Image (cartoon, rainbow, N blue to C red):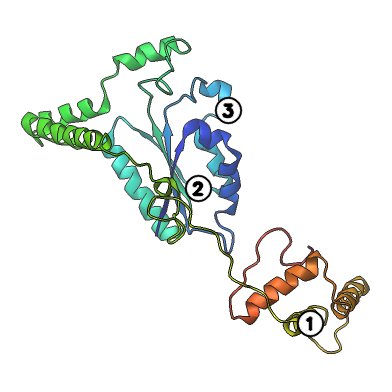
Amino acid sequence: VMSILLHGDAAFAGQGVVYETFHLSDLPSYTTNGTIHVVVNNQIGFTTDPRMARSSPYPTDVARVVNAPIFHVNADDPEAVMYVCNVAAEWRNTFNKDVVVDLVCYRRRGHNEMDEPMFTQPLMYKQIHKQVPVLKKYADKLIADGTVTLQEFEEEIAKYDRICEEAYTRSKDEKLLHIKHWLDSPWPGFFNADGEPKSMSCPPTGISEEMLTHIGNVASSVPVEDFKIHSGLSRILKARSEMTKDRLVDWALAEYMAFGSVLKEGIHVRLSGQDVERGTF
C-alpha cells in the first residue's frame, strides 16, 4: 500500500497540519513508510500571490524539515512529469521516506464559478490566456513526431467527452440521495437501504463486581516483589486500593477498569498520545 496525498500550493505552505504530519511521518508506530506528496502548484491561492502568502521561495519548502527530496517539474511537459513521478515512486519504495513532486503550473480559470481572476491578477491572466493548453501542446508534439495521427487524437477526445456526457445524462435520472455514499467509510449494517441510520441499540456490556475488584486490586499493586517505588506513586496506589475496597471510582480508576476488562477478553489495547509511556495521566 502506498499513500499519495494531493495538495494545492497555498494549502501545502499554509496549513499547519501539513507541517505536523511531516513530523509524524517517520515516528515509530505512526509511519506510513513514506508518502508521495503531489503539489499542484498553480502559483495562486484563490486570489493571493505567493509573495503575499508565504516567506519562502517555494511552497514545498516546508518538506525540508524532514529532508524529503523535492522535485520541481514543469507541468506543461507531461513526459518530464511522468519521469519525475517514477523517480518519486522508486525513492519511496527504496527508502520508505516521504517525497514531494511540485507540479509548477497555472490555473486557467477562476477559483470557482463566481471568481473572475482578471479583477485581481490582470497581468498574470493576460499571460495565461496566451498559453497554449497542455493537452493541445502535447498532442501537437505527438502528431508532429508521427507517434499518433490527428484522427486518433480526435477519437480519443470524443471517447472521453462521450463518457462525461453519458454520466451527466445518467445523473439526471437519480431521484434518491443516498447519504451513506457521501461518508468516508460507511459502516456495514449501520444504515438501512434508504440510507437512514438503523435504530441505535446498545448490547449489555456490564461485568461482575468480582472482576472489577480484581482489576482494581491489580491496578493498585506493584507487579515486582521488593521493588522500591517513588513515595508519591505509592500514595496514589494506596488511594486506589482504598477506593476499590470502598466500591468507589475516580476517572483514572474507571479507565483502568475499562482497559482491564477489555484486556481480560483477550482484546489488544493500544494507548497513544501525550505522555502515555510515562503514564503521567
User: Residue at coordinates 90% horizontally, 74% vertically from top-left?
Assistant: 239
User: Residue at coordinates 43% horizontally, 18% vertically from top-left?
Assistant: 114
| Mark 3, secondary structure of its residue | loop
Is 222 above or below relative to 33?
below
User: Residue at coordinates 42% horizontally, 61% vertically from top-left?
Assistant: 188
Q: Which mark is residue 54?
A: 3
Mark 1 or mark 3, which is nearer to you? 1
Q: Quadrant of residue 202?
A: bottom right
* Alpha carbons under labels 1 and 2: distance apart: 52 Å
Tell me if I can see residue 100 in this picture: yes
* Alpha carbons under labels 1 and 3: distance apart: 58 Å
Q: Position of residue 228 (x, y in %)?
A: 88, 82
| Mark 2, secondary structure of its residue | loop
Q: Which mark is residue 68?
A: 2
Is 238 above or below relative to 106?
below
* Alpha carbons under labels 2 and 3: distance apart: 20 Å
Task: Pick the residue in front: 214 or 281.
Answer: 214
Kindly indicate whether the residue at mark 3 contacts the one at mark 2 (C-beta within 8 angstroms).
no
* Label 1, residues with CA under 10 Å away: few <14, some 14-19, many ≥20: some
Residue flagged by tag 2: what amino acid is it? Ala
